């Protein structure tokens, strides 16, 4: 049911006034079975309020989830830790790294840690042109690159 408590109360009031379930469903833009369940629930419990649900409350809003997704689509090398520090939480001052990873997984995005360190790669042939039209040719040497990121 995606009706607020106020809408549920209005729907039950319309049903008690004798309005047809299909008409009430059209009025609120929901399926007839939703109104039927609401009416049955009201008869059994005499209330239209939601029952408490299991699970932990969300730390981020849907808008923050979209912001996390947009940030990572813009910069695929951004770490989850950095994103977590930039996005304020709903009830807390910060969002955890695990929350960011969970939201990204929900969108089908894999957040990867950028490589920090040294890597070697092999170059089979290199031709370097120098000033004065002279050329140095080398074959099979190793290049070492260091990254700071």
Image (spheres, grey):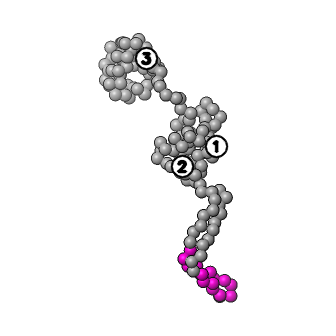
Magenta span contains residue 78: no
Front in this rendered view, residue 31 or 24 = 31
User: x%, y% of residue 127?
Assistant: 59, 81
Pointer 2: what residue?
Answer: 111
Whether tag 1 and tag 3 are in contact, CB under 8 A, the answer is: no
Q: Decide: few, some or many residues near mark 2? Use Cα within 10 Å; few <14, some 14-19, many ≥20.
A: some
Which contiguous range is marked in magenta? 123-138
Q: Nearer the viewer, mark 1 or mark 2?
A: 2
Q: Decide: few, some or many residues near mark 3? Use Cα within 10 Å; few <14, some 14-19, many ≥20.
A: some
- Judge left or right: residue 149 versus residue 36: right
Front in this rendered view, residue 66 or 12 = 66
Image point (60%, 38%), residue name? 96
**22 shown above or below 109:** above
Quadrant (top left, top right, bottom left, bottom right) of the N terminus: top left
**136 shown above or below 84:** below
User: x%, y% of residue 148?
Assistant: 67, 58
Pointer 1: what residue?
Answer: 86
- Judge left or right: residue 10 versus residue 62: left
**Label whose residue precedes the other's in the sequence (1 or 2):** 1
């Amino acid at each position: 049911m995606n009706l607020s408590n106020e809408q549920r109360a209005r729907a039950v009031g319309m049903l008690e006034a004798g309005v047809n379930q299909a008409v009430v469903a059209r009025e609120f833009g929901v399926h007839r079975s939703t109104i039927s369940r609401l009416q049955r629930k009201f008869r059994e419990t005499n209330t239209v309020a939601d029952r408490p649900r299991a699970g932990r409350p969300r730390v981020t809003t849907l808008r923050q989830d979209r912001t996390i997704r947009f940030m990572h689509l813009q910069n695929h090398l951004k770490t989850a830790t950095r994103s977590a520090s930039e996005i304020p939480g709903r009830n807390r001052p910060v969002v955890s790294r695990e929350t960011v990873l969970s939201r990204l997984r929900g969108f089908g995005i894999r957040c990867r840690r950028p490589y920090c360190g040294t890597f070697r790669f092999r170059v089979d042939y290199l031709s370097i042109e120098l000033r004065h039209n002279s050329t140095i040719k080398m074959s099979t040497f190793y290049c070492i690159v260091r990254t700071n990121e």
